[in-house]
Image (cartoon, rainbow, N blue to C red):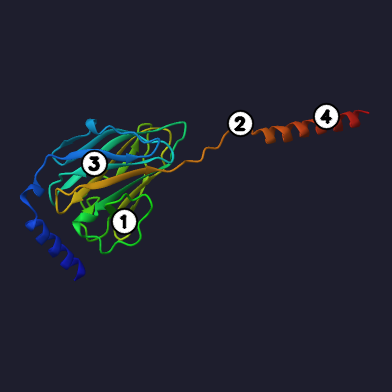
Amino acid sequence: MPKLQLMLGLGCAALLYPAGARAEPITFAVQGASSGFSADASTFTSTPFVLDFGTIGLSGGSSGFIFIDGLTARQDYAVTFHVVDPAVSPFASLTAEILDPLSDGFDQMDGSQPSYVPAGYSTSNNTDGLSFAWNSGLARSATFAGGGSATVNVDEDTNARDELAFHGFTAGESTVSFGVRDNLGDRGFLLRLSVDQASVVSSTPEPASLLLLGTGLVGLARSRRRLAA
């Protein structure tokens, strides 16, 4: 029954929303980023129900927000972009999260907010009509130019957030794809992209290790001299 009420409520809201809510063009903006994140919104393009963000630069521990506005109500959009995992400051996981505007009035179910959520927005819950195009059949993938693909963990069935987490990146270029949907339409929201700081195991011994290695070799040489005497 609650799901039926939600669907009826969103359907009525969409019908009452202004006509402009169901019209394009779509607008984009990069709205805040940390060091290591780079994206040029002037290169973003939209074709019917496809959003292409070109190439987005990310390095370990970086994050940024992409503002999206003008989606047609109740329409699924495919999102795609390229990302290069650098050899220096690499990452192993990439997370995409939807943040909805407080002005839409669908934030009653939201709890305490993570520190990265900017003023005027909140994590996406089950009542706001924003999602990663749940049950749309659109691809949710990260494929590597060198072969292979990431695994995907999804959180969109709780009121905590709408989130896709892609795991298993290695240095090189990848193509990331997923879907988004705005049931009300023409509602500016944020897409947050963030990556972890991958641990790198160095094959070069540290100075302390070299000291221990040298001490061991000296001891071995002394033992051999004693045996020879």
Residue 141 relative to residue 74: left or right: right
Residue nearer the viewer, 40 or 90 = 40
Between discs 3 and 1, the one toward the N terminus: 3
User: Residue 221 got which mark?
Assistant: 4
The residue depicted at 20 percent of the width and 55 percent of the height is 103
Give the x, y percent position of residue 155: 33, 55
CB within 8 Å, label 3 to label 1: no
As helix, strand or loop, the secondary structure at mark 2 comes to loop
Nearest to the eye among marks 3 and 4: give it: 3
Between discs 2 and 3, the one toward the N terminus: 3
The residue depicted at 22 percent of the width and 51 percent of the height is 133
> Vertical placement of 52 versus 167: above or below?
above
User: Residue 111 got which mark?
Assistant: none
User: Residue 204 got which mark?
Assistant: 2
Q: How far is the residue under mark 3 from the one under mark 4?
A: 64 Å
Q: Which residue is mark 3?
A: 79
Q: Residues within 10 Å of mark 2 (few under 14, many from 20)?
A: few
